[in-house]
Image (spheres, rainbow, N blue to C red):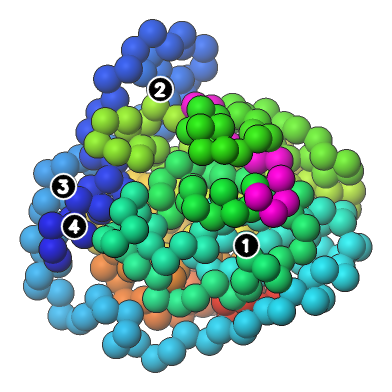
């Protein structure tokens, strides 16, 4: 790994503590300098852990280059069906954590990234190996953008600027992120704390807890809030997890909402587990989370787009299928979309 890639990975993982104070502590996940995970067993990883990881990567028995894998199936979506759909619940996987959720006639984008790299640098950092499944120009009118946290692969400023220019959507994000987004030219930004909700027509969006962290540089660790979203329509509910480790919040979300139709859960960027487990569920934990949520369908995401970790890029789906089989879950509940594919529910 060259120094540019290392610097980018360092920034992506937010490796230092925050130094800003004066926040008033109101809730268990609030601190004087920002936010924290309520899990008392949460193990925070730091700079030296990443150095150990980078050293270990030199001895992996397989290549991390996505070009060595069989081509991942991609459907180039022309958007015509999406533009004409104003009644049915649908989920389209664009790539990574970017999905288009259509519910009650609204079009909602999750963590949109169309950029070639998820990095503060245009010439270095994790590079996209599979293209977006639909072009920005083929999207239907985007009403709402939801941002789970401010890491570069989830809050991509170039993409957000293009969406602002074209659609002027409402942007929902965690506490502390509004200043960044307004400074980049976004106009309609709403910050939310955990369990806060906002209504848009017949749809209610609730910002729900996750176990993760935030940071866009070496000096702003956990200053802004991370989370997930429950999207509740008149008939259906869709849960978007963003990035998260495994904790009791999945059961709490199920207890509060119930009858979840679709859970969009991450299954990639999971290895090595000693480093990733606190903040990224793996396939086995994704199935545990799905069971906790008591959802009908699991739509996986956060894999086969950027190389952010050590597992073979084509391994998350087979491992998740095996975990579901071991848990006695019907194969029909697992909906691994091709990039660009739309599933109507």
In three-dimensional space, the C-alpha distance between marks 3 and 2, rounded to whole angstroms, equals: 22 Å
Q: Is residue 40 above or below residue 273?
A: above
The residue that label 2 is drawn on is 34
Picture quarter containing residue 185?
top right
Picture quarter containing residue 104?
bottom right
- The residue sitting at 56% across, 32% down in the picture is 182
The residue that label 4 is drawn on is 4
The residue that label 3 is drawn on is 49
In the rendered image, residue 171 lying in the magenta stretch gets the answer yes
Q: Position of residue 66 (x, y in %)?
A: 33, 80
Q: Could you say whether the residue bearing mark 2 is in a helix, strand or loop?
A: loop
Q: Give the range drawn in magenta.
A: 165-176
- The residue sitting at 57% across, 61% down in the picture is 98
Q: Could you say whether the residue bearing mark 3 is in a helix, strand or loop?
A: helix
Mark 1 or mark 2, earlier in chain: 2
Q: Position of residue 126 (x, y in %)?
A: 32, 63
């Amino acid at each position: 790994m060259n120094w540019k890639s290392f610097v980018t990975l360092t920034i992506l993982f937010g490796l230092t503590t925050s130094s800003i104070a004066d926040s008033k502590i109101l809730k268990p996940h609030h601190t004087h300098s920002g936010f924290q995970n309520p899990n008392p067993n949460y193990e925070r990883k730091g700079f030296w852990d990443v150095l150990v990881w980078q050293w270990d990567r030199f001895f992996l028995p397989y290549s991390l280059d996505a070009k060595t894998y069989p081509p991942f199936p991609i459907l180039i979506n022309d958007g015509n069906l999406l533009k004409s759909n104003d009644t049915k619940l649908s989920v389209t996987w664009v790539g990574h954590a970017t999905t288009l959720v259509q519910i009650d006639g609204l079009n909602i984008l999750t963590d949109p990234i169309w950029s070639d790299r998820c990095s503060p640098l245009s010439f270095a950092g994790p590079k996209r190996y599979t293209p977006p499944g639909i072009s920005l120009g083929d999207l239907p009118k985007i009403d709402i953008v939801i941002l789970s946290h401010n890491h570069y692969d989830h809050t991509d400023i170039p993409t957000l600027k293009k969406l602002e220019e074209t659609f002027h959507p409402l942007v929902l994000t965690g506490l502390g992120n509004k200043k960044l987004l307004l400074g980049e030219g976004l106009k309609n930004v709403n910050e939310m704390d955990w369990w806060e909700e906002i209504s848009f027509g017949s749809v209610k969006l609730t910002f729900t807890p996750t176990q993760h962290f935030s940071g866009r540089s070496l000096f702003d660790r956990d200053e802004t809030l991370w989370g997930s979203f429950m999207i509740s329509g008149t008939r259906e509910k869709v849960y978007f997890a963003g990035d998260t480790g495994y904790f009791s919040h999945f059961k709490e979300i199920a207890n509060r909402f119930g009858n979840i139709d679709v859970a969009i859960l991450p299954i990639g960027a999971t290895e090595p587990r000693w480093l990733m487990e606190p903040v990224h569920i793996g396939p086995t934990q994704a199935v545990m989370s799905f069971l906790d949520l008591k959802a009908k369908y699991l739509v996986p995401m956060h894999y086969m787009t950027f190389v952010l970790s050590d597992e073979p890029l084509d391994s998350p789906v087979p491992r998740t299928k095996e975990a579901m089989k071991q848990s006695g879950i019907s194969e029909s509940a697992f909906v691994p979309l091709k990039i660009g594919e739309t599933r109507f529910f």
